Amino acid sequence: MAERLAFLSKAYSAYYHRGMPPVDKELTQVGSGTPCGEYLRRFWQPVVVSSDLGDVPKRLKILGSRATGFAAVITAGSSAATARSSKRRASRPTAP
């Protein structure tokens, strides 16, 4: 039978003795031009609750980019929170 190491005397004790994996920059960096950042920018990101917004726009930093959050009235009695990027993106050509 295999001999147990000294630090494995308690349940789940190996958790505290494991090595940390190296940082995977492809998955952890979300700045402009990074693979993960470009992927996440394709989807809506909930970044602020509309109740946190008042009459004055709020400065935000989303995925490494500066943005402005403001409340917009859509129909009578309902509102939505919207964030607009402070930097315009160049339009990408579409395939025919």
Image (cartoon, rainbow, N blue to C red):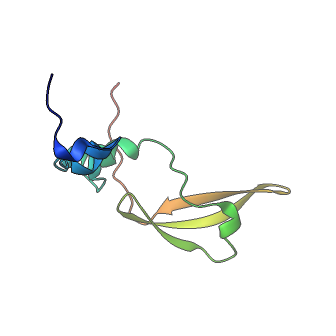
Name the quadrant of the C terminus: top left
- Toward the right, the furthest residue is 76
Q: Is residue 87 left or right of residue 34?
A: right
Of residues 83 and 31, the one drawn nearer to the viewer in this rendering: 31
Q: Quadrant of the N terminus?
A: top left
Residue at point 32% right, 44% down?
Answer: 10
Residue 78, by quadrant, is: bottom right
Residue 22 spot, x, y in % from top left: 16, 48
Residue 35 position, x and y percent, is: 25, 43
As rendered, which of 34 and 16 lies closer to the eye?
Answer: 16
Locate residue 95, reporting x and y percent.
33, 27
In the picture, measured across the screen, residue 16 lies left or right of residue 45, that is: left
Question: Is 13 drawn above or below residue 61 in the view shown?
Answer: above
Instruction: From the viewer's side, name the closer residue of 33 and 2.
Output: 2
* Total numbered circles: 0
User: What residue appears at the point 71 percent right and 65 percent down from the top-left corner?
Assistant: 51
For this view, does 41 lie left or right of residue 33? right
Tell me the quarter of the picture where residue 81 sits. bottom right
Which residue, as the protein is rendered here, is positioned at the far bottom? 56
Task: Please say if 93 is above or below 49.
Answer: above
Q: Is residue 1 above or below residue 11?
A: above
Q: Quadrant of residue 62?
A: bottom left
Residue 87 at x, y percent in the picture? 38, 63
Q: Residue at x 51, y 61 (%)?
A: 84
Nearest the viewer among 65 and 10 is: 10
